[in-house]
Image (cartoon, rainbow, N blue to C red):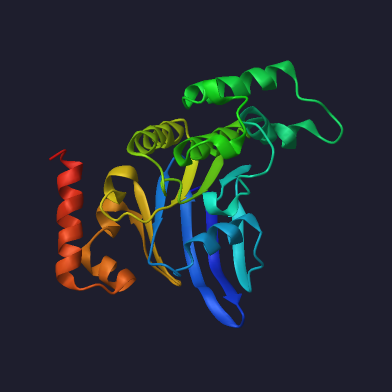
């Protein structure tokens, strides 16, 4: 099988303590994968290691194509004086090279992406004046502007409204259907089976990886979260009702 993302024996340490330990998994082309795990499990660390922002202690990472990254909103300086359209245009910098101006076609593409995400009327607005959901849409548009094959997204649904969450889920599934590979840090167990095709359950070590049907079972969730059985039974029952539209 050919993988867009292939990780072999990846170990990452923070201050001599393991943040990730001996991870092995692969993501095939055209898949939408969620990373689930408790706080401190290493979910964001994994994305940063894949991007090369964190030095791995050992292991091998293979990425088959260009990557777009959407960080957590809390990691962004929202007071920086820049407009929404300028943020989206930043996604074209990789193709521009040094001392080159954006082309008319790139400006048109940026406007189209803002339109697609319901943000066209906010193009000239300062990013500090946007709501949480609007800010998240903006950085998704910047990622799309990069025309990447692989997308890493760190908690894109955190702190946004239901309408934005629904829009983003549909967008991610559309990207998957176009053959893009997406890896998404997620925290809501009840929505995970409906949002994703594949899951990685992580708690420093990789507990399980594979299709939702294979991975999202009580035994794996208990190994990952260490929660009591009655809590996990409620989670599974709630996610089942959501998937059935009840």
* Residue 210 seen in the current view: yes
User: Which is more toward the observer, 116 or 48?
Assistant: 116
Left of 161 or right of it: where is 57?
A: right
Indicate the position of residue 87 as horizontal and vertical percent values.
65, 35
Query: How many dots with numbers?
Result: 0
User: Is 43 drawn above or below residue 64 in the view shown?
Assistant: below
Is residue 47 shown above or below 197? below
The residue sitting at 18% across, 57% down in the picture is: 236
Q: Residue at x 51, y 60 (%)?
A: 44
Q: Position of residue 53 (x, y in %)?
A: 66, 59
The picture places residue 134, in percent across and down from the top left corner, at 49, 35
Q: Is residue 65 visible?
A: no
The quarter of the rendered structure image containing the C terminus is top left
- 64 relative to 109, above or below: below
Question: Which quadrant would residue 194 be assigned to in this image?
Answer: top left
Q: Quadrant location of residue 122? A: top right
Q: Residue at x 53, y 78 (%)?
A: 18
Q: Is residue 98 left or right of residue 195?
A: right
Residue visible at 43% across and 37% down?
Answer: 172
Q: On the rendered structure, is 65 left or right of 40?
A: right
Q: Nearer the viewer, residue 193 or 113?
A: 113
| In this view, 202 is above or below 193 | below
View extreme (bottom): residue: 16
* Residue 9 picture quarter: bottom right
Residue 88 on image: x %, y %: 63, 32
Say left or right for 224 vs 241.
right
């Amino acid at each position: 099988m050919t993988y867009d993302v292939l990780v072999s024996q990846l170990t990452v340490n923070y201050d001599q303590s393991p943040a990730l330990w001996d991870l092995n998994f692969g993501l095939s082309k055209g898949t939408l994968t969620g990373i689930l795990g408790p706080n401190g499990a290493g979910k964001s660390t994994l994305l940063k290691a894949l991007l090369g922002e964190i030095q791995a202690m050992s292991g091998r990472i293979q990425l088959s194509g260009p990557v777009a990254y959407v960080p957590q909103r809390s990691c962004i300086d929202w007071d920086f004086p820049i407009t929404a359209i300028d943020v989206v245009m930043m996604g074209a910098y990789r193709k521009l090279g040094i001392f080159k101006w954006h082309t008319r076609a790139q400006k048109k593409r940026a406007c189209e992406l803002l339109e697609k995400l319901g943000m066209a009327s906010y193009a000239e607005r300062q990013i500090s004046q946007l709501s949480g959901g609007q800010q998240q849409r903006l950085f998704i548009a910047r990622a799309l502007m990069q025309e990447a094959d692989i997308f890493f997204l760190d908690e894109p649904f955190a702190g946004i409204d239901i309408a934005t969450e629904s829009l983003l889920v549909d967008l991610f599934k559309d990207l998957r259907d176009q053959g893009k590979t997406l890896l998404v840090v997620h925290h809501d167990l009840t929505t995970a089976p409906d949002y994703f095709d594949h899951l990685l359950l992580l708690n420093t070590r990789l507990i399980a990886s594979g299709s939702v049907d294979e991975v999202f079972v009580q035994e794996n969730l208990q190994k990952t979260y260490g929660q009591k059985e009655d809590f996990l039974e409620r989670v599974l029952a709630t996610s089942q009702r959501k998937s059935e539209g009840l």
